[in-house]
Amino acid sequence: MIKVLVSGAAGRMGKRIIALAHENDSIEISGALEAPGNPTIGKDAGELAGIGSLGVRVTDDCESAIKTCDVIIDFSSPAATVRNVEEASRAGKAIVIGTTGLSEDQKTIVAEAGSKIRCLMAPNMSLGVNLLFNLVEQVASVIGDDYDIEIMESHHNLKKDAPSGTAVKLAEIIAAKLKRNLSEVGVYGRQGIVGARKPKEIGIMAVRAGDIVGEHTVMFATNGERIELTHKAHSRDALAKGAVQAALWLVIQPAGLYDMRDVLGLRAAK
């Protein structure tokens, strides 16, 4: 039985992870973590997730909660994720990170933790999105510089970071394959007299509206034709299932920094 601590337990993703993990006979929810001052502190995590009492109270004490777990599943905030990674490193625990919006410095802290503990970080844990990562990489390797590339993403109106971590990852994969520096060619929205599109631009556009779970489209366009690859999430369960799968996979791996393509065996498909 693998003991899981869910960080960001009262959030949309946290609740679905708790519910789906509880259905797995190989998992025990050992803890539920939230930020200090969160109104759910002290409440039963199972009741918050809509699955009945689990006898696990939401806490803000990461140091204590981490002692009883084998792996942390973290969908919290960038600052909280960094604290959790530091605590996981001290305690020698595995951690699955789905938090997005981390700065480059924060990503470096996570990467460094991978030299000590089992650490998995992915902007999106659904099978479909990770297949999309591979597909756009394959397309980019064939088209070279002959097509304009635009990435469009849509999410609910409460999402705090933009563009989404998934959109950024898509742009990073394409830029790496085409040997472009994303910090130089990335264009995040357009306004005013911006002039003609530069040939090597990678456009990234964000929409925030209603209760959209998540939609991502990558467009490769040239004179006479275009290719569009789209993934639409109908619910958060696709991501939550992936997070649970990642936790089960990670606890039996050696120390290192992984992502979902490792979990799903998609590296060989590159």
Image (spheres, grey):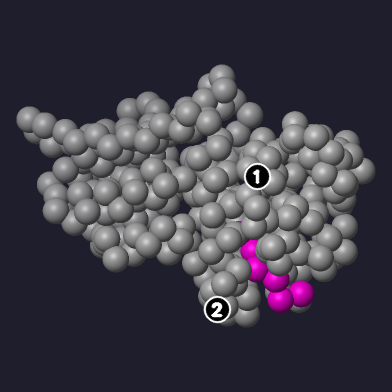
Question: Is 135 situated left or right of 111 in this image?
Answer: left
Q: Which residue is most to the front?
A: 25
In the image, is residue 105 part of the stretch drawn in magenta? Answer: no
Q: Is residue 80 visible?
A: no
Work out whether residue 223 or residue 165 is closer to the camera in this orientation and state it: 165
Kind of residue indicated by mark 2: Pro
* Residue 86, image quadrant: bottom right
**Residue 254: mark in rendering:** 2
**Residue 187: mark in rendering:** none
Q: Is residue 104 above or below residue 29?
A: below
**Residue 23: mark in rendering:** 1
Q: Is residue 35 above or below residue 207?
A: below
Residue 111, image x and y in percent?
56, 70
Q: Is residue 106 above or below residue 171?
A: below
Callout 1: helix, strand or loop?
A: loop
Disc 2 or disc 1, which is closer to the eye? 1
Write down the region rendered in magenta: 91-96
Cα gap from disc 2 to disc 1, whole angstroms: 26 Å
Kind of residue indicated by mark 1: Glu
